[in-house]
Amino acid sequence: MPASRDKKENDGDEDRGKRKGNQKGNGDLGGGADEDVLALVTVKPGSEGRAIEEIEDLFARFNVPARAAQSPVGGNVIIRGTAAKGLLAAVLGRLQSASVQRVVIFTAVTSSDLKEIATACSSALKQLMSKRQVSTFRVKAKCRATALSEHEVEVEVGRRLKEECGIPVDLSNPSVTVYVEVLGDLAGVALGRYA
């Protein structure tokens, strides 16, 4: 998965209300009933508190309707709120923290059930395909605090996408990379393009 300083472009619907697969009020991750999980920020273990303060300061400075909270899995900060994805990406792109390793802004969020993950990935990729030409894809998974393995997620999601979207896998030079972040009972999907 690209580092937070990389210029990976996340594709998807800018209107938060139109995004499919977004799960609200995700159990142990806290949050109000009207807040979506928007992003995951991976930080150096032990620096979660400092990273949360820096993110919260940015949100306050730019009036972003979102908040940062430590996840149950160390080294990860969950961003929740109602902010538009474009605004969130622009503001989080201003992070200057040495503790931040990467930022993933989700296109969709679902449970960590493998079938649900594959369905969310398929919906996100089909939505992108309705807007842009997509000739190949690959799946990259990161799994933490779950019985699912990264390989298991990549294989099953890849199989479903190939079957449902009708495009081939290209592991070396895909037109789209489908990122899956599994964190306990939560799974987030992000789409990245490479030039």
Image (cartoon, helix red, strand yellow):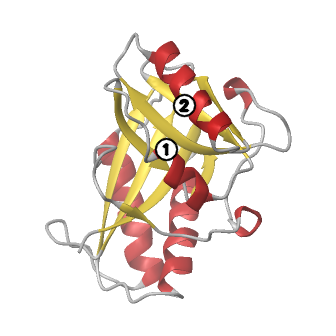
Q: Amino acid at mark 2?
A: Ile
Residue at (37% x, 15% y) in the render: 45
Query: Percent position (x, y) of residue 51?
Result: 47, 22
Judged left or right of residue 69, residue 89 is: left
Query: Percent position (x, y) of residue 32?
Result: 83, 34
Residue at (52% x, 87% y) in the render: 131
Callout 1 secondary element = helix
Residue 84: quarter of image: bottom right
Residue placed most toward the observer, 74 or 143: 74
Residue at (40% x, 10% y) in the render: 46
Q: Please say if 172 is above or below 80.
A: below
Q: Please say if 73 is above or below 95.
A: above
Total number of numbered labels?
2
- Whether residue 164 appears in this view of the structure is yes
Marked residue nearer the N-terminal end (2 or 1): 2
Q: Which mark is residue 55?
A: 2
Whole-number angstrom distance, CA of label 2 to CA of label 1: 7 Å
Q: Are marks 2 and 1 in contact (CB under 8 Å)?
A: yes
Callout 2 secondary element = helix
Residue 177: quarter of image: bottom left
The quarter in which the C terminus is drawn is: bottom left
Q: Amino acid at mark 1?
A: Leu
Query: Percent position (x, y) of residue 7?
Result: 30, 58
Residue placed most toward the observer, 127 or 45: 45
Q: Which mark is residue 92?
A: 1
Dot 1 crowding, Cα within 10 Å, few <14, some 14–19, many 20+: some
